[in-house]
Structures are given as C-alpha cells and as structure tokens.
Amino acid sequence: GQFGRGQAPPEPPSPELLAAQAEAYGKLFAIFMRQRAAIDRVTFWGVNDRRSWRRTRYPLAFDAEYQPKPALQAIIDAVSRGKRA
C-alpha cells in the first residue's frame, strides 16, 4: 500500500499544529531574508509529508496529497516582505 505494509496512514494534523508550523516557518524565513547575503539556498528534505522520514510530525509545506499547507503561504509572505525591506 501507499503507507507500507501494515502501516496505517497518520492522523491529519490539527489546525493548531498547522498554525504553529506556519508561524515557525514564517519566522525562519524572515530571518533567512534578513541574512540573505550570507545564505545561498534553503533545502527541504522532501516535498510532501507522505514522503518525509518525519511524516508523523507533518514537517513540510505540502501535505500527503501535495496540497499546500498554511506554512507555504507563510514562507511566501516572509520572502515577499523581505524583498521589499
């Protein structure tokens, strides 16, 4: 199956977890933008939560179905603000 033998799909993340994740990503990318002269790139270890080795913690900006999570918008917003600063 898509989640491996005998492995049930993880429960979906709570709205609180998604909001906290978005806030954390927003803060990180605001820092990255302030320090962009010293940062060449930011690497994500995966594209979506299903393929992540930490999938039960929902670490990435796309969910298991490749749908954007609030974290993606927080990243986009932080980068946009940083470009204007």
Image: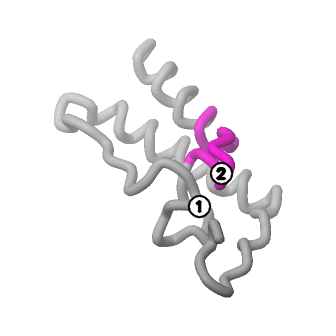
Amino acid type at image mark 2: Asp
Question: Residue at the spot x=57%, y=27% of the render?
Answer: 77
Decide: is 54 above or below 59: below
Q: Secondary structure at mark 2?
A: loop
Magenta span has 24?
no
Decide: is 60 above or below 36: below
Tell whether 61 sits left or right of 35. right
> In the image, which disc is placed on residue 50?
1
Whichever of labels 2 and 1 marks the residue nearer the N terminus, that label is 1
Question: Residue at the spot x=60%, y=46% of the render?
Answer: 62
Question: Residue at the spot x=50%, y=20% of the render?
Answer: 80
Residue at which label 2 appears: 63
Amino acid type at image mark 1: Arg
Assess whether mark 1 and mark 2 are in contact (beta carbons under 8 angstroms): yes
Q: Which residues are magenta?
A: 61-73
Magenta span has 65?
yes
Number of other residues with Cα within 10 Å of mark 1, as a class: few under 14, some 14 to 19, many 20 or more? many
Q: Nearer the viewer, residue 66 or 23?
A: 66
Label 2, label 1: how many angstroms apart (C-alpha)? 7 Å
- Pick the quarter of the image with the C terminus: top left
Image location of residue 41, percent across then percent down: 25, 38
Q: Nearer the viewer, residue 10 or 38?
A: 10
